[in-house]
Amino acid sequence: MEKANSLSLGSAAYAAKRGADITFVLLNKMGLDDASLTAELNETLRDYDETGRIKSADLKDLEIVAHKLLAVFSVPNVEKAAHMLNALLKEHANAPRLSNHGGSAWHIHVDSDDHTTWSEWLATSSALALAILLAEKGRNPGGLCASSGCGRPFIDLGKGGGRSYCSPRCATRERVAAYRNRA
């Protein structure tokens, strides 16, 4: 998995990757209780230098947004992905504004303010980032890992696109499995 700090803080790629990682944690909780899930989510936030803390009361609304984001990651069709992102932005976004909360570098927000709900923050920051990357690349910048048993959402920042796996580890596992099946 690509490290968060290998991307530029405040960039669309950084926010999109953060959204993919939070979506994965929310939708792959594998029997975690609310306290363990919030701890894992807060650890993910720390990985991205986010200072706030998610509470158990935030989980239901965050999961609803995560399902919407997962749907965007799963769509290979750029037009359908664009329509889905537009719907997310229409539902959650406000006028763009610059923010440097917590002493961070200036960056664009489309949530209502620096003290909004976690679900609004996740929806707006992720949808805006994915929309920017879609416009830049002319394709859905996200995908779901094709490795059996993984399904992790990921951001494809390559020039050619068409990446199928979230990491070299998953790609290698699939190549080895295919080789063994042929042998």
Image (spheres, helix red, strand yellow):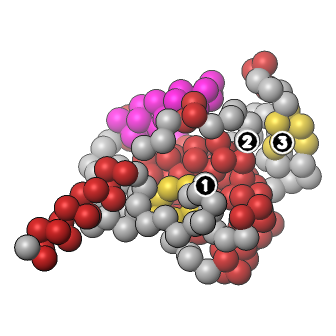
Q: In front: 117, or 70?
A: 70
Which structural element holds mark 1? loop
The reply to whether callout 3 and callout 1 are in contact (CB within 8 Å) is no
Q: Which residue is mark 1?
A: 157
Please tell me how crowded label 2 is: few (under 14), some (14-19), or many (20+) other residues with Cα within 10 Å. Answer: some
Using residue 94 as the reference point, say whether residue 180 is left or right of it. Answer: left
Q: Is residue 142 above or below residue 3?
A: below
Q: Which residue is mark 2?
A: 11
Q: Which residue is mark 3?
A: 108
Query: Is residue 53 one of those drawn in magenta?
Result: yes
User: Dividing the picture into quarters, in which one does residue 130 lie?
Assistant: bottom right
Q: Residue 25: where, in percent of width, then height?
A: 43, 47
Residue at mark 2 to residue at mark 1: CA–CA distance: 12 Å
User: Dividing the picture into quarters, in which one does residue 85 lie?
Assistant: bottom right
Is residue 59 among the parts visible in the rendering? no
Name the quadrant of the N terminus: top left
Q: What amino acid type is highlighted by mark number 1?
A: Leu
Please tell me how crowded label 3 is: few (under 14), some (14-19), or many (20+) other residues with Cα within 10 Å. Answer: some
